[in-house]
Image: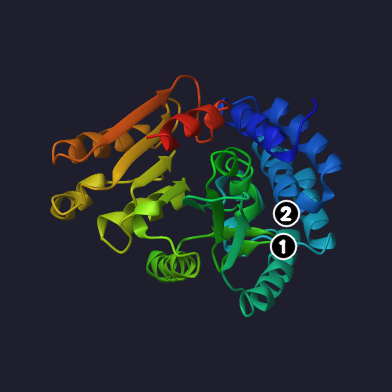
């Protein structure tokens, strides 16, 4: 198999979500050998696959490799990971957890939000991108950085200060996330002499939920919000606020029919359309919680709106 890291990652999760654990393990091992800078992900994947296959010694060996690499992943995640449940009480597992906790505490003390910018020669607007959980600004940029500038718009990826591993970030503290992202976006708009109507906000998974809530709560009112595989749960909680959703912001939902969040996304789309909002939903067949391969083409159509 050839491709960049994100192609391997997509293939890994397709195999994993399909219950093809031996295949997923082979992909994880190949990815680990090609992309050592992604050890915090690939060795975690290897550990989980070995655990699911009942090979507990090999599972803990993969975690020890991660600790030895100098990288880290949130120890709390490992302690809740059902795929590694058989390891939880073992001394080797506890030793790895201790190392990763200490490493994570040091990094969190100095972590700050980051803004990553891609600008064409002439820009008539800007699209802000909010990453998935356990990814970073660089990863979300892979899906936007070529298409958006080619349409004479700037692309700005915003990376959370909330870190959960080497190069891995999240938006778990949603109130902090709203404060960070709105501050960075508003400052950027002023600096570049753009208005909110010149802006589009896009988010994936947890970042998609963040993008939606920023608009729902009228913290930001861009001309469009693009929500890719949004991590929505119990969307009825939004009912009271949906009536005040700014109608000048168009909504575009993208989800795969194999995504565990698909039903809630469909429900949210229907709820908000009933309030007169310009909301459209595209459901991709046979896709789980990941970007569709033709996302660039879809994006070009949406940005010409």
Residue 260 image offset from top left, x and y in percent: 42, 35
Q: Which residue is mark 2?
A: 40
> Tag 1, which secondary structure?
loop
Q: Residue at x 55, y 46 (%)?
A: 82
Q: Give whichever of 236, 225 is nearer the camera.
A: 225
Residue that lies at the very extreme toward the front in this rendered image = 122
Q: Is residue 89 visible?
A: no
Q: Is residue 262 left or right of residue 205?
A: left
Residue 118 image offset from top left, x and y in percent: 62, 53
Q: Residue at x 82, y 45 (%)?
A: 35
Q: Vertically, is 155 above or below 99?
A: above
Q: Is residue 295 left or right of residue 62?
A: left
Q: Which residue is mark 1?
A: 72
Contact (Cβ within 8 Å) of mark 2 with mark 1: yes
Could you classify mark 1 by the number of other residues whose Cα lies within 10 Å: few (under 14), some (14-19), or many (20 or more)?
many
First of labels 2, 1 by sequence position = 2
> Tag 2, which secondary structure?
helix
Q: Residue at x 45, y 26 (%)?
A: 258
Q: Is residue 225 left or right of residue 154?
A: left
Q: Give whichever of 53, 249 is nearer the camera.
A: 249
Residue 143 image offset from top left, x and y in percent: 59, 40
Indicate the quadrant containing the N terminus: top left, top right, bottom left or bottom right: top right
The quadrant where residue 7 appears: top right
Residue 135 image offset from top left, x and y in percent: 60, 52
Could you classify mark 2 by the number of other residues whose Cα lies within 10 Å: few (under 14), some (14-19), or many (20 or more)?
many
Q: Which mark is residue 39?
A: none
Cα separation, mark 2 vs mark 1, equals 6 Å
């Amino acid at each position: 198999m050839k491709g960049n890291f994100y192609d391997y990652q997509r293939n890994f999760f397709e195999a994993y979500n399909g219950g093809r654990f031996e295949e997923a393990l082979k992909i994880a091992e190949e990815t680990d050998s090609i992309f050592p800078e992604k050890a915090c992900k690939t060795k975690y994947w290897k550990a989980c696959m070995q655990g699911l296959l009942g090979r507990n010694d090999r599972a803990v060996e993969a975690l020890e490799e991660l600790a030895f690499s100098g990288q880290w992943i949130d120890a709390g995640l490992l302690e809740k990971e059902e795929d590694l449940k058989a390891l939880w009480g073992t001394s080797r597992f506890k030793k790895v957890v201790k190392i990763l906790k200490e490493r994570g505490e040091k990094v969190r003390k100095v972590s700050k939000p980051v803004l990553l910018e891609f600008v064409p020669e002439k820009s008539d607007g800007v699209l802000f991108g909010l990453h998935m959980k356990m990814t970073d600004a660089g990863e979300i940029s892979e899906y936007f950085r070529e298409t958006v500038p080619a349409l004479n718009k700037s692309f700005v990826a915003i990376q959370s200060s909330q870190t959960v591993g080497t190069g891995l970030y999240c938006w778990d503290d949603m109130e902090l996330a709203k404060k960070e992202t709105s501050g960075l976006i508003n400052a950027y708009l002023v600096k570049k002499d753009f208005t909110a109507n010149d802006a589009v906000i896009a988010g994936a998974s947890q970042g998609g939920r963040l993008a939606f809530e920023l608009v729902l709560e009228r913290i930001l009112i861009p001309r469009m919000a693009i929500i890719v595989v949004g991590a929505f749960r119990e969307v009825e909680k939004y009912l009271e606020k949906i009536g005040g959703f700014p109608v000048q912001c168009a909504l575009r939902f993208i989800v795969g029919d194999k995504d565990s969040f698909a039903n809630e996304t469909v429900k949210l789309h229907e709820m908000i359309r009933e309030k007169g909002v310009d909301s459209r939903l595209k459901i991709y067949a046979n896709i789980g919680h990941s970007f569709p391969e033709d996302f660039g083409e879809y994006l070009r159509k949406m940005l010409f709106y």
